[in-house]
């Protein structure tokens, strides 16, 4: 359950960082340092999210769903 909560928190952090960088891009056109810094945080959170997904799948806390099997043997 802790991994699922961590994944949700990381997704929220990614969205906050994305909208923060958008705000800096629109608001402060002459200073792009804040925009780049916020985008760096978004990439960092995205990498952490992928790592958490891999750990969750490896430990069995997250179980990937496959496509349903279709039975084509009916004639």
Image (tube, rainbow, N blue to C red):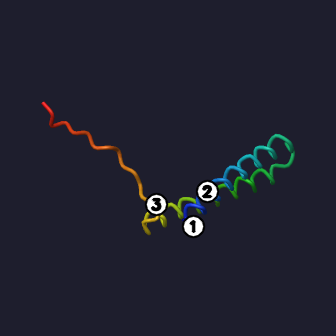
**Mark 2 highlights which residue?**
8
Disc 2 packing (10 Å; few <14; some 14–19; many ≥20): few
Report the quarter where the N terminus lies.
bottom right
Measured as percent of width and height from the top left, residue 28 is found at: 86, 45
Report the quarter where the C terminus lies.
top left
Q: Nearer the viewer, residue 48 or 7?
A: 7
Q: What is the spatial separation of the Cα atoms under label 1 and label 2, in whole angstroms?
A: 10 Å
Measured as percent of width and height from the top left, residue 44 is found at: 64, 60
Q: What is the spatial separation of the Cα atoms under label 1 and label 3, in whole angstroms?
A: 11 Å
Based on the displayed image, in which of its 4 quarters is residue 57 positioned? bottom left
Task: Indicate which disc residue 39 carries.
Answer: none
**Mark 1 highlights which residue?**
2
Task: Indicate which disc residue 62 carries.
Answer: 3
Q: Residue at the location (57% across, 67% down)?
A: 2
Q: How many marks?
A: 3
Q: Nearer the viewer, residue 5 or 37?
A: 5
- Ranked by sequence position, the earlier of labels 1 and 2 is 1
- Left/right placement of residue 28 relative to residue 3 reads right
Measured as percent of width and height from the top left, residue 5 is found at: 60, 61
User: Which secondary structure lies at badge 1?
Assistant: helix
* Mark 1 touches mark 3? (CB < 8 Å): no
Q: Residue at the location (69% across, 57% down)?
A: 40
Q: Residue furthest top?
A: 75
Q: Residue furthest front?
A: 1
Q: What is the spatial separation of the Cα atoms under label 3 and label 2, in whole angstroms?
A: 13 Å
- Left/right placement of residue 10 relative to residue 69 reads right
Q: Residue at the location (63% across, 54% down)?
A: 11
């Amino acid at each position: 359950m802790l991994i699922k909560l961590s994944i949700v928190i990381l997704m929220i952090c990614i969205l906050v960082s994305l909208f923060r960088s958008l705000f800096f891009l629109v608001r402060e056109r002459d200073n792009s340092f804040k925009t780049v810094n916020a985008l760096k945080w978004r990439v960092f959170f995205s990498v952490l999210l992928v790592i958490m997904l891999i750990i969750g799948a490896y430990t069995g806390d997250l179980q990937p769903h496959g496509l349903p099997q279709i039975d084509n043997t009916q004639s």
